[in-house]
Image (cartoon, rainbow, N blue to C red):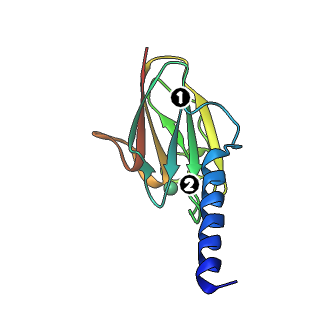
Amino acid sequence: MTSRYRWSLLAGVVALWGGLACGSDSSGGPPASGRKTVLVDNNDFQPLSVNINAGDTILWSWSAGSITHNILSTGAPAFASRGTNAVPGVLDTDYFSAPESYQVIFGAAGTYEYYCSQHGTTGGPTGNTGMQGTVVVSP
Ligand SMILES: [Cu+2]
């Protein structure tokens, strides 16, 4: 076997491998439409604001290496929080770090505000600051 032949064979194997990787989708779960992912990073939510339709799902996914964060719904309309803040801004009782994910189905239209009580604040005159996010749900 010549060196040149060996290299072309290797290239063919790599091409086949790449083709298989692209062609096989065994991730399962709900279809991509109807669900959007928000990354929980250090220390912000990406994207900051996300638009969905009523009935759609938001999946928050803690990025690899993320330190502890939570997702607290503020104001109205509200959604089920991930974590608690027993005394707002003072005593935070639970946080989560990667690997962690959390999902909420938003059944009703509205603008939903949330924040992480360790890296954001709430209740100010301009609303949430720091590590905070918004989900805008259209009817
Ligand atoms: Cu945080």
Mark closest to the chain's N terminus, 1 or 2: 1
- Pick the quarter of the image with the C terminus: top left
Q: Secondary structure at mark 1?
A: loop
- In the image, what residue occupies the spot 62% across and 36% down? 103
- In the image, what residue occupies the spot 59% across and 73% down? 8
Q: Percent from the top left, x then y, of residue 64?
A: 59, 62
Q: Percent from the top left, x then y, of residue 101?
A: 64, 46
Q: Amino acid at mark 2?
A: His
Residue pushed farthest front? 1
Residue 90 appears in the picture as rendered: yes
Residue 94 appears in the picture as rendered: no
Residue pushed farthest left? 126
- Pick the quarter of the image with the N terminus: bottom right
46 or 127, which lies in front? 46
- In the image, what residue occupies the spot 53% across and 28% down? 33
Identify the mark at residue 69; answer none if there is no mark: 2
Given this view, does label 1 or label 2 mark the residue nearer the observer? 1
Distance from label 1 to label 2 (Cα)?
27 Å
Name above or below for residue 65 compared with residue 103. below
Q: Judge left or right: residue 21 versus residue 50.
A: right
- In the image, what residue occupies the spot 64% across and 58% down? 16
Label 2 residue near ligand 1, CB within 8 Å: yes
118 or 101, which lies in front? 101
Count residues near mark 1 (Cα–Cα under 10 Å), then give few for <14, some for 14-19, many for 20+: few
Residue pointed to by mark 1: 33
Q: Amino acid at mark 1?
A: Ser
Name above or below for residue 121 compared with residue 112. below
